[in-house]
Amino acid sequence: MKLVLLTFAIAALAQQPEEALWRAGTTAREAGEFAKCKDAFARLVATQPKLSPAVASLGLCEFELNEYPAALEHLQKAVDLGLPKDAAVTGPALERVAELATKAGLFDRAMTLFRLSFALNGESPDAIALAGLIVLRRPMFPGDVDPDDRGLVFRMGRAALTVASGQTDAARTMLEGLASDYPTTAGVHYAWCTLLLAGDPDACASQLKQELAVTPAHVPSLVALAVIASKNEAWDEALSYLERALKADPSDSAARYQLASVHLAQGKAEQAATELEALAKDAPQSAEVRATLASAYYKLKRKADGDRERAAAQRLQQEKKAQP
Amino acid sequence: MRWLALIILSAACRLAQGQQTVVCTHCHPTEAREHAATLMARTLVKGEAAPLLQPGLSVRMGDYTYRLAGNSYTVSGGGITMTGRIAWAVGEGDAGQTYVVEREGRLYESRVTYFARGQGLGNTIGHPVGPPANPEEAFGRVLAPLAVIECFSCHSSPRPEKAPDGVTRGSLAWTQTLLPGVQCESCHKGAWQHAEARKSGDMAHGRLPRLKKATAEEISEVCGVCHRTWNQIQMKGPRGILNVRFQPYRIAHSKCYDALDGRIACTACHDPHKRTEPAAAVTDKACGACHAVGTCKVGHANCASCHMPKYEIPGSQFRFTDHFIRVVKANEPYPD
C-alpha cells in the first residue's frame, strides 16, 4: 500500500511542481513517511513561504520526527500567517503548536494558542490536561504527565476551563479544593492567583506569597508581586522581588522589563534605557519594550531616539494586531 | 429649582475646598483656592452630599424603574425591588455622574448615569446597551477590588497617613480613607513629604519636581496617569472612536507634537489649578506660541473649532474634543 502511495507521489512530482509537492507531502504524511513529508513541504515552503497550510504541514511533519524547535517555529509562523478555519491542517496545527509552546516553557504564548485550539477543536482529555499544564507552568506534553500528577493536572485544567466559561463560583470551589489537597505543590497557589484573583490584588498577593513559601524561586510569582508593589509605588519592595527573580533566572524578560520600568518610575532614566536597550536586542518583537524605551529616551531629552522607538512600537503593535 | 441646585452646588464647592489639602494652602493660597473650584477637585463626592441627588432622579429602562434620591438607589421591576446605598457619586456632573452603590457588602457601578446634556439618567457607558435583560444586570456591575482601586486612584487622592490595619484595599472602608477628588498629591507626587519638610525646615529632602519646566511628554505622563498615556492606549487600546477621550494619546499623533517642547504640553491650554476657560481663549494663545498670524488660509481665530473636531462616543451623550490636532478632511473616518 505504502509503495502504491509513494509511486503516486513520485508520479505527482512530474506534474505541476507546487501542486505535486503538496500532493507528495500530504500522501507521505498520510503514509506515516514523515521524513519524506518534511522534505516535500520544505521544498514547497521554499517557493511559497507564505502558504500557511504548507508551513503548518511542514511543522506537523517535524513534530512527528521529534524536531520540536523547528516544528514550533513553523507552526507558529503558520498561525501568524493565518490558517484557514476550514483547512484540514488547521485543527491539528493549533493543537500541536499549543503543546509545543507549553513544552518550550512559553506559557503565555501557549495560553493564547490553546484558546485558539480549544475554540476550534473543542474539549478532549488532552485539551484539559494541556490547560492544566499551562496554568501550572509545567513544560511537558500532556502524554508525559507522571501518573501521580494526573489528578492535579486534570483538576487544574478543568478549573481553568470553568473560569473561561464564566462560572467563577464553581471555579473558586475547585481551586479551594486544589489548594487544600495540594498545599505544598509548586504552581497551585500561583495558578489560583492568575486564574481567579486578577481583580483582587491583595488576595492575589497572598496566594503568591504562599507560592513563594513552597517555591522560593518561583519567578512568575516574584514578578507578579513586583508588579503589585509597583502599582502601590512601593518601589523598594518591588526591587527586592525583582532582585530575587533575576537571581533565579537572569534572562527572564518579564523580570528585566519590570526592573527597567521601576527604574524609569524612580527617575533613573539612564539605567532604565540601558536595561531596555539590552532587552530590545533580546526581544526585538516586543512593542511594549520599545514603547517604554521611547519614554526613557524622552526623559533623557533624546527626542530623535524616542521618536524612532515610538514608531517602532507602533509598527510592531500593528503587525501584532494583523495576526489572527 | 435651579436656584436650589445652585445653592447646593455652592455649598458643595465649599465642602470640596475644605477637603483641599489645607497644609498646602499656607504656602500656595492662590493655587489651592482656585483648584478647589475645578471639576477635578470635585470629581468625587459622598452620595449623601451629591447635589444632583437631592431633588431625586428617576428613569424607566425596559421593565425596570430606577429611583435615586439622597443616598438611596432603588431598582424595581420583574416583581422585585432591589435597594442599595449610594456610597459615592463619581464625576462632578458637568458632563455626567455615575454612582458607586453598596449592597449586601458588595460595591456596584450603577447601571444608570446622570447625563448633563439630557438632564437625566441614561445607560452607563460600558454596560449592555438597551433595556436590562435580568435583575442582576439591571442593578449594575459588581466592582472587583482592582476596579475600585483603579476608579478611586483617579477620582481621589491619598491622605498622608496610611490606611488603618485591617482595611482591605478596594473595599468600601478603604475608599473612606481617601481624600475625595484630584488633590495636590495626585499630580505633585511627594507633596505630603514636601509639606512636612517645609514645616521642619528641611527643604533639602522635600523638593518636588518642577512641573512648570516639564516637557510635553513629562506632562503627558503626569496627566496620563488618569487620562492615559500614549503607551497605555497603544499597547492595550481601546481602538477606534473610544480612544477620543484619552487626550495625551491623541495629542501625540499631531504633526505639531514635540515630546520635548512644553508649548504643546497639556498645560499649554489647561491650567490644572483653574476652572476650564472657553476653548477659543486658551487654544488660540497656545497655537500662536508657534504659528504666526496668517499661517492658516481659512481663519485667524478659534483654531480648535476646525483643527480639533468633536466626536461623540455612542451612548456617552457628550461630545469629546479630539486632541489629535490636524487639518481635518471632509468625511474622513476617525483617524485611529
Image (cartoon, helix red, strand yellow):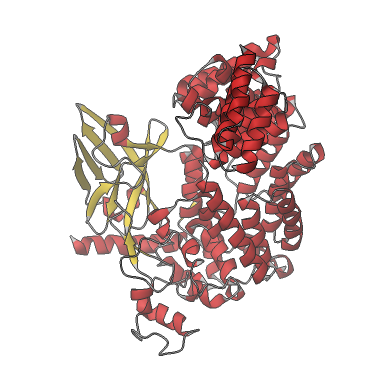
Query: In the image, is A224 to the left or to the right of B130?
Result: right
In this rendering, the answer to whether B276 lies above or below B156 is below
Q: Can residue B168 be seen in this view?
A: no
Total marks in image: 0
Q: Which of B230 and B111 is in front in this view?
A: B230
Q: Is residue A133 visible?
A: yes
Instruction: Return the residue nearer the eye: B44 or B96.
Output: B96
Pinpoint residue A39: horizontal percent, then vertical percent.
68, 30
Left or right side of B162 for B206: right
Instruction: Return the x and y of residue B1 as percentages of the image width and height.
Output: 17, 60
Q: In which quarter of the image is residue A267?
A: bottom right
Q: Is residue B120 left or right of residue A298?
A: left
For the C terminus of chain B, the image quarter is: bottom left
A51 relative position to B77: left or right:
right
Whether B163 is drawn above or below B210: the answer is above
> What residue appears at the point 32 percent right and 55 percent down from the top-left corner?
B96
B171 or B129, which is in the foreground?
B129
Could you say where residue B132 lies in the image, as x and y percent from the top left? 26, 36
Q: Could you tell me which residue is drawn at 56 percent across and 57 percent down?
A: A314
Q: Where is residue A75 in the image (x, y as percent from the top left)?
A: 61, 34
State the residue lying farthest toward the right.
A247
Residue A99 quadrant: top right
Which residue in the rendered view is the most extreme toward the top?
Answer: A147
